[in-house]
Image: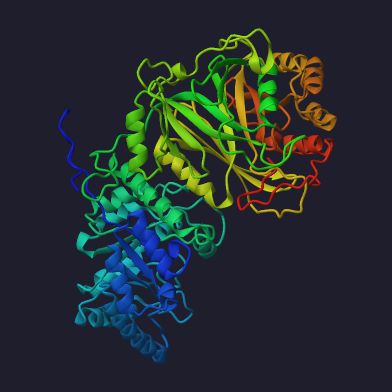
Amino acid sequence: MSTTTRPAGATPPPVRTWRNSIATVCISGTLEDKLAAAAAAGFDGVEIFEPDFIGSPRSAAEVRSRCADLGLGIDLYQPFRDFDSTDRDRAARNLRRLHRKFDVMEQLGAGLMLLCSSAADDAVRDDDALTEQLAVLAAAAGERGLRVCYEALAWGSHVDTYQHSWRLVEAVDHPALGVCLDSFHILSRGSDPAGIEEIPADKLFFLQLADAPHLTMDVLQWSRHHRLFPGQGAFDLPAFLRHVIAAGYTGPLSLEVFNDVFRQAEPQRAAVDALRSLLLLQEHAVGRLPSGPRAPVDVPPAPPSPQLGGYAFVELAVGAGSGPAVANALAALGFQHAGRHRTKPVQLWQQGSARILLNAGGPEVDGPVDGGGPGHGAAVAAIGVETADPGAALARARALLAPVLSRTRGPAEADLAAVAAPDGTEVFFCRTGAAAVDGWLADFPPVATNGGGPDGPGGPGDGDLDGIDHIALTQPYDRFDEATLFYRAVLGMQTRMNVEIAAPYGLVRNRVVADPANRVRVCLNVSVLRRGADWRPGVVEPQHVAFTTRDALGAAEAAREAGAPLLRVPDNYYDDLDARLELPAEVLQRMRRLGVLYDEGPQGAYLHFYTEVLGGRVFLEVVERVAGYTGYGESNGPIRMAAHRAQRESRPSDGRDGRATERESARTDR
């Protein structure tokens, strides 16, 4: 691929369409399940992981035929381990084993094998002797019309860097032996990938890609359990790929990810997530998404990430039991019932630029409710994000494999486009101020009644709150990293924070994604371990919406006077706050009375307060950011969780002894 500078205003050349491949080890199921999932997601080829093949009832010829039927090429057969040996008898046995695996490859129609550097105790540690053994292997492969790519394992006994593996391949100098580059093995050791550009392109036989979080642990355990798809971890894979492209590599972009969660998740869903990660990586490496015959959509080129202007709305699905409770809480916080949808049972509540839709027309939400029964819960069902070009945002989402949702609308209603996030939350692309068909506010004629509460006077509220700061969504355990990639890929958001909180009921992982201007912030939460159904009192997949204010103490005072169900915070918290920070006594006393929490960071302070849980899983928060504070009061998380527990314990039982419904998804008391 050319890296020359284009003249200003010149038409950019078409982006190369890469062959996308995935190792069967990345996803769960039998070999048959994995192949079907890879094909359905849109991959061009697969790496056959030997244990998957050995466990399959299909012969090599049958696997070859099945891949052909699915439109999949077999790009690699892997791995061949511990070939070289200082023990002559073992070296002879390894050569026999090699020829048997060549037989399998011929029947599979796989022309390339992955050879890992040895991690055995008897590995050859003399480069001259190792070159001799590799030359024998290369000659054997060449005689049969096959090729072998040599990979340096980060934990290899002697060869553990890609530079060393290349020196050996160069010394053998045989057309059947080349190098396999693996991003994990290179970046986990801190090796400089710039040296890849010095390797001749015809010796770069294969490329394997994996991301990972930064961890301090044994590299083998890190590799076997914590790899991620590109864009989900902390490695700079776009820079890595640019070095590979500059070297002239033209083979497949292939994923090799060992991850305990992915290998238990539904295979087709994981495969779609995997391909999305490759598409996003290509965009970040070369500047835009690929186009052409293998592109996911026939829109060359796909649009760039949308610029987000903030939240247009947050939609809460409510039932008969939770709807009035949520509406009353909003009214007490200063929101007004500003409109009602023309044709649907959806209310618009507004204060400043903060808009909440209460939708009573969707499926009832399962879960326990304060004072109610199952099927009357509340949930964050959808978010609307502001963007200048909703059509382009939708085209990008489709290109990145986001499921587009079909919607029914009346002839005069806004034509809003929506896609589904991994947890089922609907994401709408909006232009709130538009007069065109996508100006959605026109679907909500103003209401004008005399009372307060759910039927209060029409028009936007003008109280203490002025916008939506963030939303927090607990993710199903299997979809936490998938959700991160979705928001990064589809909406162009960035990971802002990763923290773990020692919550009252176990460790909770928090990850924040936000657009570059921090206008749309989403906090993703997940329990590190799942809890069973008998631990009480549980909140199933808790969620909350946080509103902004310039005066948290004043907003809390007004909300309490209006009867808002504010969360009571224990006195012990304020005693500790006084001991640590020595806040002014009158301020601390007011915070104690109102249940306002406080946090300080290097760039400012954070005052915030919460409502009680409304409808079993949803609660509201009001936040004041002082002097550029960028966090989320995460140190107060355990305090809030314990306070919500105390709130539920003080309420009468709902007939099920306070136990939450067991769900397959994460169970986090957030």
Q: Is residue 180 left or right of residue 616?
A: left
Q: Residue 592 appears in which quarter of the rendering?
A: top right
Q: Return the residue found at the far bottom.
A: 89
Taking 216 as reference, is 87 above or below it? below
Taking 447 as reference, is 2 above or below it? below
Q: Residue 6 appears in which quarter of the rendering?
A: top left
On the question of residue 148 being in view, the answer is no
Front residue of this view, candidates 417 and 128: 417
Q: Position of residue 575 (x, y in %)?
A: 83, 29
Residue drawn at point x = 19 percent, y = 72 percent: 175
On the question of residue 309 being in view, the answer is yes
Q: Is residue 616 left or right of residue 413?
A: right
Q: Residue 148 appears in which quarter of the rendering?
A: bottom left
Front residue of this view, candidates 10 and 465: 465
Q: Position of residue 99 (x, y in %)?
A: 31, 85
Q: Position of residue 122 (x, y in %)?
A: 46, 82
Front residue of this view, candidates 496 and 421: 421
Taking 350 as reference, is 120 above or below it? below
Residue drawn at point x = 51 percent, y = 21 percent: 341
Q: Position of residue 452 (x, y in %)?
A: 68, 12
Q: Is residue 450 left or right of residue 402?
A: right
Front residue of this view, candidates 151 and 173: 151
Residue drawn at point x = 66 percent, y = 31 percent: 633
Residue drawn at point x = 29 percent, y = 73 percent: 64
